[in-house]
């Protein structure tokens, strides 16, 4: 029996933003193949008044508008049967990283609630027990691009999307290190030589060079990741003793 498709369900005021870039390349191909599936739901269809109002002024005053809890609750109720965790995209959430991406890829799907304006009434987020997720410490104009980012990172992990399962193994963040620098032909380009070892044909020495390069570059570019890597290594060694 074929595996069930990973099911993304998106609640948004702008359904036209989907699948957007995920209709192209690997994600688009696997969407057509049924490896994952995408449903979008327009939050505005759950507005109750004749003006189809979805937002209101913030209680206590302040700028912008807030998505109404009754409207968002009705939208969430409508997708009660959709599989996976309920995710509210917000800069206040847990910052996305590869372990969270793997966790989401291991689920049957996810439901994404995309806020616009200033955000969503907190009561509906709390009542539904939603997972709040941020894609980084910057402000987007809404949750849609964040949802697309998460879906992109999840979909490429689904079985059958990237040919060789092995191609994930050496990737950045799977090892805790950044990837080594890449080179292709010609060996001498613009008077700049690619590292000689890469043309040596010695697979063992090439692997060693790449491992060293990954360590050097991680230390230089991302001291925060390097520190975390060293701590993880130390813990691993302790566990072995
Ligand atoms: N909505 C606005 N900014 C966001 C961010 N950085 N991450 C997730 N959702 C957002």
Image (spheres, rainbow, N blue to C red):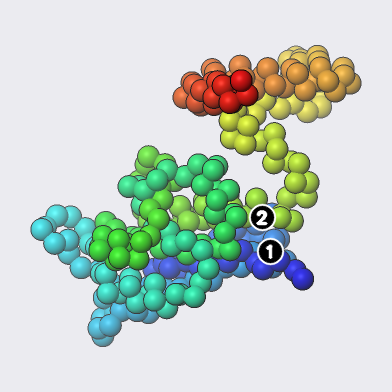
In the image, residue 140 above or below residue 32: above
* Residue occupying the far left of the picture: 60
Quarter that holds the N terminus? bottom right
Per the image, label 1 sits on a secondary structure element best described as loop
Q: Which mark is residue 158?
A: 2
Residue 39 or residue 106, whichever sits in front: 106
Instruction: Give the percent coordinates (x, y) of residue 194.
Output: 76, 18
In the image: residue 36, left or right of residue 98: right
Asked if residue 161 can be seen in this view, the reply is yes
Q: Are dots 1 and 2 in contact, CB under 8 Å?
A: yes
Residue at 28% over, 83% down = 48
Residue 163 is labelled as none
| Res 94 quadrant in image | top left
| 160 relative to 240 in the view: left or right | right
Please, is residue 124 above or below residue 134 in the view?
below
Mark 1 and mark 2: Cα distance apart in space: 8 Å
- x, y (%) of residue 81? 49, 75
Quadrant location of the C terminus? top right
What is the count of numbered marks?
A: 2
Asked whether, in this view, residue 227 is left or right of residue 114, the answer is: right
Whether residue 114 appears in this view of the structure is no
Quadrant in the rendering for residue 204: top right
Closest to the observer: 129 or 164?
A: 129
Q: Residue furthest front?
A: 241
Which x, y percent locates residue 106? 60, 55
Residue drawn at x 43%, y 68% is 11
Residue for point 41% across, 67% down: 12
Which circle marks residue 35 in the picture?
A: 1
Secondary structure under badge 2? loop
């Amino acid at each position: 029996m074929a595996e069930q498709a990973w099911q993304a369900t998106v609640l948004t005021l702008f359904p036209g933003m989907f699948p957007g870039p995920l209709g192209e390349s690997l994600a688009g191909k696997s969407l057509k193949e049924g490896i994952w599936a995408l449903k979008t739901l327009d939050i505005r269809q759950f507005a109750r008044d004749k003006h189809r109002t979805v937002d209101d002024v913030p209680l206590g005053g302040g700028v912008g508008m807030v998505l109404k809890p009754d409207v968002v609750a009705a939208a969430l109720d409508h997708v009660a049967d959709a599989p996976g965790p309920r995710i509210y995209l917000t800069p206040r959430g847990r910052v996305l990283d590869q372990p969270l991406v793997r966790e989401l890829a291991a689920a049957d799907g996810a439901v994404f609630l995309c806020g616009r304006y200033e955000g969503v009434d907190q009561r509906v987020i709390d009542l539904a027990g939603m997972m709040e997720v941020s894609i980084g410490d910057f402000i987007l104009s809404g949750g849609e691009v964040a949802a697309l980012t998460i879906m992109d990172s999840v979909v490429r992990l689904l079985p059958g999307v990237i040919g060789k399962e092995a191609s994930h193994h050496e990737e950045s963040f799977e090892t805790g290190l950044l990837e080594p620098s890449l080179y292709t032909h010609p060996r001498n380009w613009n008077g700049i030589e690619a590292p000689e070892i890469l043309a040596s044909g010695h697979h063992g020495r090439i692997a060693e060079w790449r491992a060293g390069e990954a360590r050097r570059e991680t230390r230089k570019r991302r001291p925060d990741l390097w520190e975390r890597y060293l701590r993880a290594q130390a813990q691993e060694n302790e566990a072995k003793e």
